[in-house]
Amino acid sequence: MTRVVIAPDKFKGSLTAVEAADAIALGVRDALPEAEVVTCPVADGGEGTLDVLEAAGARIVRLTVRGPLDEQVKARYAVLNGTAYVESARACGIEFVEPSPETALAAHTWGVGELLMDALVHGAKRLVLTVGGTASTDGGAGMLGALGAGVLDAFGAPVGLGGGTLTRVASTELNPVRERLEGVPVAVATDVTNPLLGPSGAAAVFGPQKGAGPAEVALLDEALGRWAHALQVGGAPDVTRVPGAGAGGGVAAGAIAGLGATVESGFDLIAGLTGVDRALDGADLVITGEGSLDEQSLNGKAPAGIAARAKPRGVPLMAIAGRVRLDEAGLAQLGVVGISALIDHAPSFEHARTHAAELLRARAAELVRNWASR
């Protein structure tokens, strides 16, 4: 019996990874009714991670926290085998703001700290923080503040919330955070390698996506530099050169410095919980996908992660995406034997977005039929 493994990431704005996997599975069964189909939706530690964890058996905890601009937002985190998985974007995601220069400076991560605090209060033995999709560039200062840290100016007064306020930060008091953690290990799940500062840093690379213009980018980069120094004043290590510290607007830096977090591959961490490695053993075909297959897909995203697991097992790889922006060399690097873009089979981008499930089903069926007939 032919065994087909389906392991997509989310199609942002259209389908969760779970929904995408289900749609592709229908297409595979249309083409090969007798096939054994195994769905293993995956995530890279960004938005949508909680949906994948819930499908893997995690318990979802829901609560209301402070959003990126102080309004209350409904958030959630996942608990699996004693580990709490906190997705930063559930508290301070870009979807909670209308990006502008003002929000780029004002957005903060206080709600992320509230999620971590709730997990600690309820007995989490380990914390995993995913950091993609935030509206903030505050270096995790709000998060640490919610956990009891002092974020202080030169006169010992709190500087307030938002990345823009960090131009005044001079020191931190981190002992209250360490006491709350009581030795609970923390990991930051990300496949972004950007440092905290400079032309490849949090402000320069991600700030414009959050509404920052050139002036705000320069101000935020300076502010994050002051923040890194203030963390050192509080006894934390220097995070300015740590790869990945710039992830999530620098919330990774705050976690590394203030929570003693280690940086782990988001994709590897989540994939290890979904059973995809076991599923690929003995598989005849694997199908992956995401909203946009582009250069970023080659660096720690789902297609590259699945390709890295499929190749040594000799399992052919197919990919379906909303759009494909990889050239032949990029596709060759992934080693795909079949590729399809939904936008190529839809009258408009909007149609492709709103009809993604049915398009995924149809494209999967055609790819699998062509593969099976070879």
Image (cartoon, helix red, strand yellow):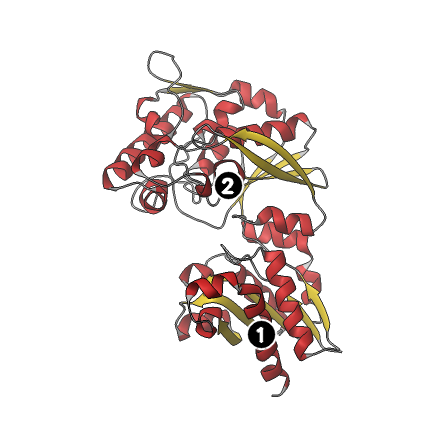
Q: Is residue 235 above or below residue 281?
A: above
Q: Nearer the viewer, mark 2 or mark 1?
A: 1
Quadrant assignment, res 307: bottom right
Q: On the image, numbered disc 2 is attached to which residue?
A: 89
- Can residue 293 be seen in this snapshot? no
Label 2: which secondary element: helix
- Residue 29 visible in this rendered orientation of the protein: yes
Q: Residue flagged by tag 2: what amino acid is it?
A: Ala
Q: Position of residue 265 (x, y in %)?
A: 54, 50
Residue 273 percent coordinates (x, y): 67, 51
Q: Residue at x 67, y 66 (%)?
A: 280
Side of 334 where 226 appears, left or right: left
Check disc 1 and report the residue beneath it. Answer: 362
Q: Amino acid at mark 1?
A: Ala
Label 2 to label 1: alpha-carbon separation: 32 Å
Which badge, 2 or 1, is on the more N-terminal residue? Answer: 2
Q: Nearer the viewer, residue 193 or 324?
A: 324
Above or below, 216 against 26 in this view is: above
Q: Residue 270: percent from the left, percent from the top?
A: 61, 51
